[in-house]
Amino acid sequence: MDLFANLALGFDVALTPFTLALAVAGCIIGTMVGSLPGLGPSNGVAILIPLTFSFGLDATQALVLMTSVYYGAMYGGRISSILLNIPGDEPAMMTCLDGYPMAKKGRAGDALVLSGVASFVGALLATIGLMLLSPLLARVAYLFGPAEYFALYMLAFATLGGIGSNNQAKAALAVCIGLAIATIGVDATTGMTRFTGDNMHLFDGIDFLVAIVGLFAVSEVLVFIESHGKDSAIGVKLEKITIPWADIFFTKWTMLKATAIGFIAGLLPGAGASLGSFLAYMQEKSSVRDNSEFGKGDPRGIAAPEAGNNAAAGGALVPMLTLGVPGSGTTAVLLALLMTLNITPGPTLFNDRPEVVWGLIASLLIANVVLLILNVPMVKMFSKVLQVPPAILLPGVTLVSFVGIFSLTGSYFDLLLMIGFGVLGYLLRKMDIPSVPVILGILLGGHMEVNLRRAMVLSDGDWTYLFQSNISIGLWVFAILGFIAPFFLRGKLKVPTQSS
Amino acid sequence: MTDRITGFIVVVLALAYFAGATTLSQPFFADPLGPKAFPMGIAAVAVVCGLVMLMKPDEEPAWPGLTTLLHIGYAVVALVLYAYGLKPLGFLVSTALVGTAVSYLISPNLRVSVLTGLGMSGGLFLLFKFVFGLSLFAFPRWLIG
């Protein structure tokens, strides 16, 4: 019964005209951002966060807007995968494999509708999963003390590194960079300054939004300058949109299976949507009897990754809300939003701020319906967005980032810092050092250290305290497995190619 | 080579960071770990990562040619100038300039770049000023008094 009362509260919050308008606006912006190659959910959300503050939104409204953008971008990512053979964002990579070949056969519209429906199934069921599972996980999270939280952060960093890069040393280095940046500023426990070089601007530490916008948005501009923004023309014809009922019916079990796989992948801290779509595709390909059409435009090869990645997007919200540990790059950015709004995610959030949690869940349910409408009947409109040349789009991204950060912090020093992070992000990308662990390190470093020190205070300096409870032992075991597993699985984690 | 050089730089920086951490003073009250230990741990892990990169480098990344690197350099300089120029030059002028520059660096078509710069400057000004209600100065302050 609790669930319905909570949902009623949520819809009460979400169905005010203004909040509803924000959800719709978020869906439209998100789908656009997602469909543009090079701009994914994390960049999109990162650029928009500073603006939500200048817009004066309260916590629930800001969260509704940003998660709608997030869901929208996850839907939109497939559009350029199918029409251009360029993934709109990383998780949409798998959709290229069968989406583009199907479009080349003259069925671009069918591919878009089918993937839109698969996205809807994945995202809707995952939102329901989020609704059912989060309160349960929140109850478990009450058992967490400092030692368990420290182990949980280790788990997040270990799995994130394992999957995010092809080189464990580089992934671990990325975490270290983030954690080291987090130690800059006044130490919360003793009040002494660390690593500030007596620069007054650094006493408060480095604002994680500055780092996020620099690493995600500014570095993207530099990458585009390098590639000279090769204009991408749509190479396939988009005919009148009709609903391919036969394909949808044919792939109904595919979608459900992919949703389950994606949701679980999303739950793992650090794994995220790319893993969800990858596993969903691979599982589908290996389990069907006749997979000779995969890579040539098999409808199951479109439905599986799309249901998988959108389900993972919902799943990734579960650890973010209940434990304060994001499951992906974009949820890391959303966590930054929450922290800036002075909301501490974690089990207490469900008791202290039910209107935030349930308002968010209700909005996600509404957003899914809006997104289905935007992404099926109106998908043609978004395919036009793809034709905006980067030479027009990217200057806009830069300028919005600047004004956003400047309006948020009002400091020239932060603008320079943001540019610095942009350059760092570019270099990291060239060297295959993932930038998401850097962000996560900056975000969680403070909490991680505080929990470690609290644990040491409680145990009077006895290190074995970190490994005493069953929960922490379990988390450590998973952390170690998560870090070493890729050494053995690397060969299997290869993305298959399209067959021409 | 890139990985070896980066690995070396990482080791040096991590050692410097470690040294910086050792100079932090230990407080008297009950905080067995103090402010030093966590940074020292990070430094230790980073040294190991740096050494691994030094010993076992990946394939060389595809670095762009000198001209492209220069273009990226120009863009960074333009952005730094923008950060300093935003206030003295006013929003409209500085934004139009940097918008044009970034657009031109991505795709060298002067007409498109100038139009992009002007359009962005005007459009974003209206958006930020009237929709978001930010206090932006359209023109240099000495001009409007």
Image: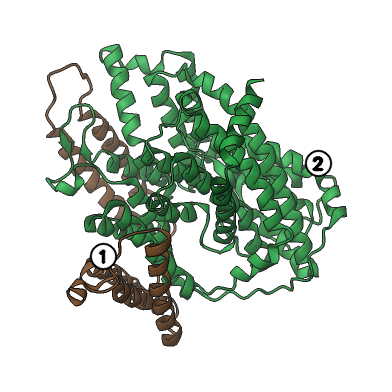
Chain colours: A green, B brown
Q: Image quadrant for the N terminus of chain B?
A: bottom left
Where residue B76 sits in the image (x, y, percent)?
Answer: 30, 68
In the rendered view, would you say B145 is above or below A63?
below
A32 relative to A416 in the view: left or right: right
Badge 2 amino acid = Trp
Quarter assignment of residue B44: top left
A203 relative to A171 in the view: left or right: left
Which residue is label 1 attached to?
B83
Where residue B142 sits in the image (x, y, percent)?
Answer: 17, 74
Quarter assignment of residue B33: top left
Write the residue at 40% across / 47% down. A170
In the rendered view, would you say A198 is above or below A1?
below
Mark 2 crowd level (few <14, some 14–19, many ≥20, 10 Å Cα): some
Q: How many marks?
A: 2
Nearest the viewer among B86 and A175 is B86
Q: Secondary structure at mark 2?
A: helix
Residue B61 shows in the view: no
Where residue B139 sits in the image (x, y, percent)?
Answer: 26, 74
A50 relative to A315 in the view: left or right: left
Where residue A136 sits in the image (x, y, percent)?
Answer: 58, 22
Badge 1 amino acid = Ala
Query: Residue A253 bears which disc, if any?
Result: 2
